[in-house]
Image: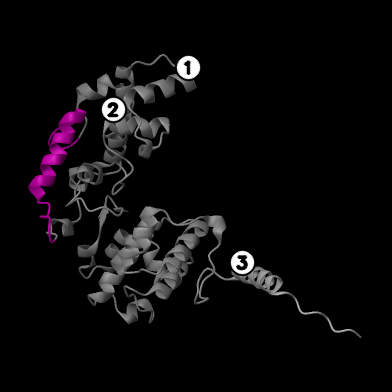
């Protein structure tokens, strides 16, 4: 039988490249082979990168992507999860949470594998995950032992990845958003209207653009003044809802730890926070001391029935 001729150098090179490409397509995204991230759930957005990354002392991008993927298919919020894990890790670091409390599971910063395990434990309420599934504020209320000092919550919601000590524009939002530590639920009439219409905050529509979009879609003959009144009505209605549920001015406050200074920024004093809150109450037509919408504001916004239910 005649010998099979050897392939030419160019053919060998081409075959080698094809094999490398095939191997590359099969390769797991994690070079260590620990995790396989499903692209169907998308990658982490900037808040998720911060909350599940540097917030927990992690720089392992694959682990962060895996945690984000798990949150997406387990229907958990990445911001609240990351803040709750950071609270638990700080409590463990300070000796407030012990191995006895956690069932032998160490809660440490810089532990990527530990974070992924904790995400699963929280989702299925296993072991210490049963406590952490309540969120950091309820968990702190159950745990006690001074753990409340490490919270980053407003009205029970974990704050996103901004620090109002060096971001003045975020102070009013975190202090006064009806939903608590929410960076997207802005407190101005302009942004209040965006929420009601369903427009993206990041596109930063001007008022006349918002008005034109609303007219085009609905056919309503609405004026700029009516548009502002609609936004004001929504914000005041949210305030009435919170009052009905037992909230008060005492809930319009940042966590205690934000009174501590940063290396380049001073802490926020109670007096500074009180001024922001009072000025906002006055601007909205609410009582400057209590935040209860005044009778005049209620009549102007036609919210009499809602005010009755709010007590």
Could you tell me how far apart the alpha carbons at marks 3 and 1 are, in whole angstroms?
52 Å
Q: Residue at x 32, y 44 (%)?
A: 179
Estimate the x, y position of residue 221 in percent, counting from the top left: 41, 13
Report which residue position mark 2 lands on: 232
Q: How many numbered marks, from 0 up?
A: 3
Instruction: Estimate how packed mark 3 is, as few (under 14), some (14 to 19) or many (20 or more) residues with alpha carbons within 10 Å.
Output: few
Of marks 3 and 1, the one in the foreground: 3
Does the rendering let one see residue 272?
yes
Q: Is residue 62 left or right of residue 301?
A: right
Q: Residue at x 29, y 59 (%)?
A: 137
- Which mark sits nearer the N-terminus, 3 or 2? 3
- Mark 3, secondary structure of its residue: helix
The numbered dot on residue 219 is 1
Instruction: Estimate how packed mark 2 is, as few (under 14), some (14 to 19) or many (20 or more) residues with alpha carbons within 10 Å.
Output: many
Q: Residue at x 26, y 70 (%)?
A: 90
Farthest-out residue, right: 1
- The stretch in magenta equals 263-291
The numbered dot on residue 25 is 3
- Which mark sits nearer the N-terminus, 1 or 2? 1
């Amino acid at each position: 039988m005649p010998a099979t001729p050897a392939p030419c150098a160019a053919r060998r090179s081409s075959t080698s490249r094809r094999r490398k490409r095939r191997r590359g397509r099969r390769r797991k995204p994690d070079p260590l082979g620990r995790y396989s991230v499903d692209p169907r759930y998308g990658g982490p957005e900037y808040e998720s990168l911060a909350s599940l990354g540097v917030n927990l002392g992690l720089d392992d991008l694959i682990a962060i992507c895996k945690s984000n993927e798990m949150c997406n298919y387990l229907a958990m919020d990445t911001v609240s999860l990351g803040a709750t894990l950071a609270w638990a890790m700080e409590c463990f670091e300070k000796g407030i949470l012990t191995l006895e409390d956690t069932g032998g599971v160490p809660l440490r910063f810089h532990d990527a594998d530990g974070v992924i395990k904790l995400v699963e434990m929280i989702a299925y309420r296993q072991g210490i995950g049963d406590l952490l599934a309540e969120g950091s504020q309820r968990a702190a209320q159950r745990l006690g032992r001074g753990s409340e000092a490490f919270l980053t919550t407003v009205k029970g919601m974990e704050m996103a990845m901004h620090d109002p000590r060096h971001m003045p524009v975020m102070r009013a939002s975190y202090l006064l958003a009806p939903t608590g530590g929410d960076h997207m639920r802005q407190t101005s009439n302009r942004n209040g209207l965006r929420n009601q219409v369903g427009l993206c905050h990041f596109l930063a529509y001007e008022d006349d653009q918002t008005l034109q979009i609303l007219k085009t879609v609905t056919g309503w003959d609405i004026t700029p003044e009516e548009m502002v009144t609609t936004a004001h009505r929504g914000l005041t209605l949210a305030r009435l809802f919170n009052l009905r549920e037992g909230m008060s001015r005492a809930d319009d406050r940042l966590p205690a730890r934000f009174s501590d200074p940063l290396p380049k920024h001073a802490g926020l004093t109670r007096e500074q926070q009180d001024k922001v809150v009072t000025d906002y109450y006055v601007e909205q037509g609410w009582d400057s001391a209590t935040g209860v919408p005044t009778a005049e504001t209620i009549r102007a916004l036609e919210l009499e029935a809602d005010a009755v239910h709010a007590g």
